[in-house]
Image (tube, rainbow, N blue to C red):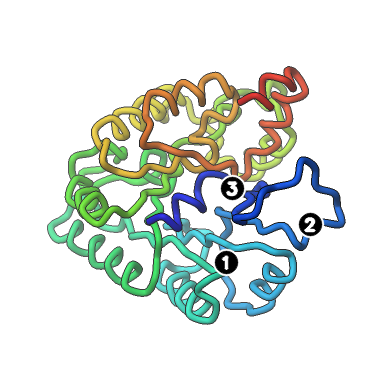
Amino acid sequence: MRALRNLALATTALLLVGAAPAPDVYGEADFARVRKLDAHVHANVADPAFVRLAATDGFELLSINVDYPDFPPIAEQARIAYAMHAADPKRFHFATTFSMDGFGAPGWAARAEKQIDAGLARGAVAVKVWKNIGMVAKDAAGKRVFLDDPRFDPVIAQLEARRVPLIAHQGEPKNCWLPLDQMTTDNDRSYFSEHPEYYMYRHPEEPSYEQLMAVRDRFVARHPRLAFDGAHMASLEWSVDELARFLDRFPHAMVDLAARMSQVQAQSNADHAKVRAF
């Protein structure tokens, strides 16, 4: 578990993991020699060139499998991760996942635990849950499923007992609930224009941003023994102050920066000193 904690403390930015003291300043010429970690990638093609490039550029990788319909099926993602990890286990790490199909039906928890066990047996260092929990998935009765649903308890107990971290993409950027002209970043305008099914401003009947964040907080509070990684700045990308409060409240939690650096930049433009201090 030490491996993932080192991996997940910072992502997509350059994370120094070398033992030698770091110089005060790095230049562009130092890029390849500085050891780095990208802790949120999705390697969905078994291409050795990807890992060779990572080695050339001085990166370790954490590839995250996810229950996402636009990606290959979970079994195919697993096959790719197993092969790439076996080829270079010191450089290529991966997180496994489980399917939400049939949630709430008899045997679902056992099937999910079996999927997790299979991934851990092949070297997975974490488990990922996606935003379909809370924003898409429904149970057999047609009721929306949230992460604090007690029917997840057997799966979470398994992770706690084995000291396996959970990477959770819960909710979306707060921009998702705003009109396009009020969004703070161009990449969010582009993404939600192209993915109207996830653009909650157009779906006021769906759960609000505040509701999803409250669910996430209840879940983290209920599981103080679980190493919790809030993917994408825990969907608090809009405010380092809010993110600081989250991390202070939940010392067993961490976050990653994946796909949210533009929001960090937007805040830096407004108050560089505060963001740098954070």
Please, is residue 69 above or below residue 271 in the view?
A: below
Marks 3 and 2: CB-CB under 8 Å? no
Q: Nearer the viewer, mark 2 or mark 1?
A: 2
Marks 1 and 3, the one that precedes in the sequence: 3
Residue 226 image offset from top left, x and y in percent: 29, 43
Question: At 54% from the left edge and 42% from the top edge, which residue is drawn?
Answer: 256
Q: Residues within 10 Å of mark 3 (few under 14, many from 20)?
A: many
Q: CA distance from mark 2 to mark 1?
A: 22 Å
Amino acid on which the number 2 mark rests in the picture: Phe
In the figure, residue 51 lies in which quadrant? bottom right
Residue named by callout 2? 31
Marks 1 and 3: CB-CB under 8 Å? no
Q: Secondary structure at mark 2?
A: loop
Residue 45 image offset from top left, x and y in percent: 59, 73
Marks 2 and 1, the one that precedes in the sequence: 2
Residue named by callout 3? 11
With 30 as the anchor, is 13 left or right in this view? left
Residue named by callout 1? 43
Please, is residue 202 above or below residue 111 in the view?
A: above
